[in-house]
Amino acid sequence: MEIPKTLIDALVSLDNVSGASGDETEVADALRAQMDGLYDEHFEDSQGNQFYIKKGSSAENKILLSAHMDEIGFIISYIDESGFASIMPVGYHDDRMAVNQDLVFRTAAGGKVSGITGSKPAHIMSEEDHEKVIKIADLFVDFGTDSAEETRALGIEIGDYGTFDRQGRFLNGGEYYSGKSVDDRAGLACLVELFRRLQSIEHAATVVAVGTVQEEVGMRAGGPIVNRVKPDIMFAVDVTLTGGTPGIEWKHAANRMGGGVSFNYFDWDPVYGMTGNNVPRRVTQSQIAIAEKYGIPYQRGVITGGGTDAWLAYMAGEGYLTGGINIPSRYVHTAVGTVKLSDMVHTVEFMCRYVADYEGAWNNNLTRTQI
């Protein structure tokens, strides 16, 4: 399979900038650079969501596709007299993955400051220590300073956001790309490639691509973006869990790396606020019809423990028709999230075909036309 260099460039460029939830400015700038020349209109709302509009031949129908700009991260909560900083998690972390990591923090002036998360060496751990998971709230960040004054002289202050400090890479020259924030820079890269291809595709519907903020801390942009755009239909483009690695049973994560684009049927997080989306059948059936018409490999997604911007979008205003377009991923919410480029290519191909064939959906007055 031929992988567009533009898709690779977008993924690498977007993954390798920092953007913890609440501090997405650097990602927005990178997205703007990638989208240059590919849209008819662009604007930013008060939350920081980035709207890109590609007009179709008809002004009546609008498709909204969102991908979140933010990544899980950390925030400085305290600086002690020796210069070490305490942190709190921003987003849903696995505490086991935060120990002995390289981090980078953005200062109020826009600078970058490197730090490491430290812990007690194994040599002096008790038996109880060895069996205990160190909570993020109990970690400290070492900036290589000897006092609070030295740490603050670097520009670090309480309230500064940080992320994993890791450059993404292709694993041994293959199709697998591992990066700190493929959730959801992979989705953003697919939207960029979609807009690139729309330059040569006739389409009736206006397409609105949105890079959203603060998805990882409660999917907060879903409602505001659909209330502003008022689309016929909205899709959240995000990563999804996969099986196939040691220790994960297929029945818990049935999507496969390399299996193609995944269509979300159901997601639900019963622990963190009962979030989720039971996608209407007419949406998933329309997705499958397009995929099968054009021979695009696809999968069906059913997961618990997560959600997307489609959750709040579904309930916003008088209610909007929403669904999910998902990219299979390994090691979600860690510094080594991994995607396969062929799945991204199939995701882009599906979105292109869906937009090109789209002739209208169920609008907010519940008038059914054709999809």
Image: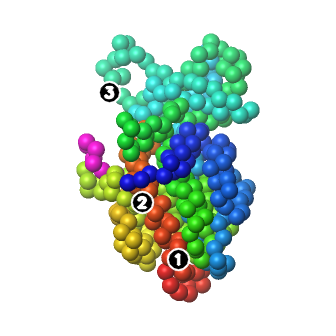
| Image disc number at residue 346 | 2
In front of the other: 246 or 35:
35
* Residue type (three-letter) at the residue carrying disc 2: His
The quadrant holding residue 292 is bottom left
The quadrant holding residue 196 is bottom right
Residue contact at pointers 2 and 3, CB within 8 angstroms: no
- Alpha-carbon span between mark 3 and mark 1: 55 Å
* Residue type (three-letter) at the residue carrying disc 3: Glu
Q: Look at 39% across and 61% down and name the residue there.
A: 262
Left or right? Give the position of 304 relative to 5: left
Residue contact at pointers 3 and 1, CB within 8 angstroms: no
In front of the other: 218 or 353:
353
* Residue type (three-letter) at the residue carrying disc 1: Tyr
- Alpha-carbon span between mark 2 and mark 3: 43 Å
SS for callout 3 = helix
State which region is magenta: 242-248
